[in-house]
Image: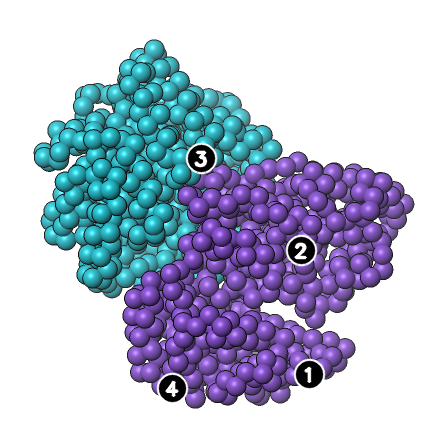
Chain colours: A cyan, B purple
């Protein structure tokens, strides 16, 4: 699915045109531009199994003006542009399958403005999630979206990321107020204003959220923030039976208990985490919960949740407000994917990402669990189960064609199952290279044609991250 | 700004073509289609001062298939199509300024599906807000968006409506999961799935939310629902000084008190309400609050809010959980615009709609209040101040050119003030006919050009509600 294809707009076949443009870019950007082999290789892939695609040039932009100049030159010379944050995406989003310029935004890493009064901030696209968290501490504020990886805020916006706290606070789609975007022709727009709500014209903010670099380059992002809660508590609980664990989650959500995170790790995932992170978690299916609020509210909600979980067969409920204990637990959770990969040295991960209406989640997970067993693949399950979203972290050797075929068949069955249940093929990882056929199956030809019309209208030369989301035009 | 213009795509000049299409539509739709004078007149305007524009034909569609057939015929014959719910919009959205077909969706009024497990439902676009509320009661659920008017859910989605509860629950933009939309060529799409979150391709749901009928016709809407709170309480408090009232709101919001509604009525608005609704509210600036939750939480939050309001100079804090008392209060609030209009029989209302970051709200409202006084206009202020959004309900006689000029100058100053503060010209009413120049001033030529490119891509013949949002192409 992810091979290097030299056709379509900005094709490498027109080498003279492209080379002239690359030289112009090198003149304009000097030491900010490089064709160094290691840098090109580093910008040829994300963290997925998808085949790398090497760019012709990497430019480390330092300002919106840099981005605008780069896009104007690329537009003249028909050179593809692939925005790059830190490469933590999972569907080949940043792989330069048509070559071109990998536009690295990591130097645009300034927090430009924080307002305690308005509970918002504006940051450059290259600001890292953990950096932002640190810079917000003195204000007593935090930005909740937490996909695990220390991604850039721009990358999180471009992918429509979410993660462990969506169940309480919402995802990027809910928490981005506005963005500065450079359009393919080099013009610069603000997608909206800082006001909390607006009905002013078409929703350009949501057009670029989740557009995966295929419509323009996000250079600044204004975010909603929250006060750091007075108290935070983590809880864990074990379940012998996977279906019961998920049913318990559904009951907690349906009763409106204000849980801030509610994560599932199946038995295989817990075992991997123990091996990798030197934890001693009981090797059963586990739920990991977090509560935010006043001390009183946190204790009240944890107690209620504990009772519901016990009613559904949960055992060994533990509860802790200790910061160090919580950090260990959540770091282990966030490292779960790497923990699972480490079980087979040299292998790569193939991460599924379906999300279903919560009423169907228990059935979806248990059917998938049986399918994993009968498919003979190694795929522990972790998931943001409060949103109906879960991942099977399949460990693969991409060179093993038979194994890849088996895994792709499994993934196809999983997605079909989710779609039949009213779900989506991707809750938070996006389409990238890997899910284009599933996008069509999910929304139909007419809806995807509409997306293609929009792509053509915004990027008529087809130079922005070509081949992703809606494929080559 | 809002005159009948016979030019542009689907022009009346090509009368033969249009008439042939209208006859085809009458053949297809039989008694569902009418050229009756009263019906045409009723479909020529919304509730604003904008000049009416009469359609050539009104079609009462009863299904998505009806809409698709209508759009296919209109597309062939270049006939404009204006979706119509119940005409409660405020910027001339439904005025048929180029004639054509007014597509009345009020007969598509079925609640198709309610899921208590998933806390969601799917309704036809013509379902009324109050009807939905009634139908959800047996499930113990409610849909919070409340713009005051008993609008259709489809109209609320098309306008990007919000209202009094946005501060707690969010607006249509946050609470619509997915929609069924008929595209201008007659094809039918679902914009998304029922899953709580997705990263599957461009965000078509948000493309159509707030598109005001200019990109397609919304025929079904899936909504997020909430459990009816165990307890609901209303509170009122008076302020001699307007600036203090707004500062008090800001303090309540910034402290994260979970107020469900927090509305301001200035002294003139309270007086109008008393005269119209036979209430005996103290004629000072008033805040009207509502709290949702468990009995304990509601009392706790109301107490906290009461203390903060008193600290800021609020007096006469009253608190009631009595349903009848609450209904009278909120009905009076929702009737405020009509109460104000009734102060000058025969006049119409010109409603402003700016929304600013909350840190600037007190300044924006007090400066506007002074401007009202010095402009010699009658314009009480009401507002969803928890979101930074407020309305000046200016009573006008559109035939009085001098007065209209004075009011338009006032509105221009108000919008300039809001834009300088980082705000928007419209928090919830949309652009329609009335705010096109302000949209350009707010977001700039490049952003509005991008909207126009999208309009052309989705509606290349320019037949969908022409002249609105981005103007005639």
* Cα distance in 3D space between marks 3 and 2: 30 Å
Q: Nearer the viewer, residue A462 or B179?
A: B179
Residue tagged 4: B315
Q: Is residue A339 visible?
A: no
State the SS at label 4. strand
Q: State the separation of the CA atoms marked 1 and 4.
A: 31 Å
Q: Which residue is mark 1?
A: B344
B458, A378: nearer the viewer: A378
Q: Is residue B113 left or right of residue A107?
A: right
- Return the residue at label 3: A423
Q: Is residue B160 left or right of residue B56?
A: left
Query: Which chain letter goes with mark 3?
Result: A
Q: Secondary structure at mark 3?
A: loop
Q: Chain of mark 2?
A: B
Q: Are marks 3 and 4 in contact (CB under 8 Å)?
A: no
Identify the residue under disc 2.
B85
Measured in 3D between alpha carbons, the distance from the residue under mark 1 to the one under mark 3, in whole angstroms, is 53 Å
Q: CA distance from mark 4 to mark 2?
A: 42 Å
Which residue appears at 33% of the width and 83% of the height?
B310
Circles 1 and 3: CB atoms closer than 8 Å: no
């Amino acid at each position: 699915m992810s091979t290097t294809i030299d056709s379509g707009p900005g094709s490498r076949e027109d080498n003279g045109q492209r080379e002239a443009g690359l030289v112009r870019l090198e003149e304009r950007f000097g030491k900010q531009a490089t064709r160094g082999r290691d840098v090109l290789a580093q910008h040829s892939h994300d963290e997925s199994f998808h085949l790398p695609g090497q760019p012709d040039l990497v430019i480390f932009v330092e300002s919106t003006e840099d981005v605008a100049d780069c896009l104007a030159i690329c537009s003249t010379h028909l050179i593809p542009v692939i925005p790059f944050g830190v490469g933590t995406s999972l569907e080949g989003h940043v792989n330069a399958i048509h070559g071109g310029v990998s536009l690295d935004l990591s130097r645009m890493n300034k927090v430009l403005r924080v307002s305690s009064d308005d509970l918002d901030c504006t940051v450059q696209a290259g600001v890292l999630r953990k950096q932002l968290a640190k810079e917000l501490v003195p204000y007593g504020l935090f930005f909740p979206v937490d996909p695990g990886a220390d991604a850039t805020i721009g990358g999180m916006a471009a992918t429509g990321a979410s993660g462990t706290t969506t169940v309480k606070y919402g995802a990027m789609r809910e928490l981005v107020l506005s963005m500065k975007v450079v359009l393919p022709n080099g013009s610069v727009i603000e997608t909206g204003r800082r006001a909390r709500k607006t009905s002013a014209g078409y929703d350009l903010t949501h057009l670029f959220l989740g557009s995966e670099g295929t419509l323009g380059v996000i250079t600044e992002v204004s975010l909603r923030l929250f006060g750091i809660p007075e108290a935070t508590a983590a809880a864990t609980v074990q379940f012998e039976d996977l279906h019961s664990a998920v049913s318990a989650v559904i009951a907690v959500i349906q009763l409106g208990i204000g849980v801030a995170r509610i994560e599932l790790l199946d038995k295989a995932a817990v075992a991997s985490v123990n091996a990798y992170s030197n934890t001693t978690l009981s090797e059963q299916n586990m739920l990991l919960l977090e509560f935010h609020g006043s001390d009183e509210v946190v204790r009240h909600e944890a107690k209620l949740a504990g009772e519901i979980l016990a009613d559904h067969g949960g055992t060994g409920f533990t509860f802790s407000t200790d910061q160090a204990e919580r950090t260990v637990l959540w770091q282990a959770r966030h490292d779960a994917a790497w923990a699972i990969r480490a079980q087979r040295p040299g292998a790569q991960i193939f991460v599924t990402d379906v999300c279903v209406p919560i009423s169907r989640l228990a059935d979806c997970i248990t059917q998938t669990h049986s399918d994993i067993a009968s498919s003979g693949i190694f795929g522990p399950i972790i998931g943001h189960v409060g949103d109906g979203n879960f991942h099977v972290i399949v460990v693969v050797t991409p060179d093993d064609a038979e194994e890849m075929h088996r895994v792709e068949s499994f993934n196809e069955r999983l997605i079909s199952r989710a779609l039949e249940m009213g779900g989506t093929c991707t809750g938070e990882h996006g389409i990238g290279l890997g899910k284009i056929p599933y996008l069509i199956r999910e929304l139909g030809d007419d809806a995807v044609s509409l997306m293609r019309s929009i792509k053509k209208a915004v990027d008529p030369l087809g130079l922005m991250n070509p081949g992703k989301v809606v494929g080559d035009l």
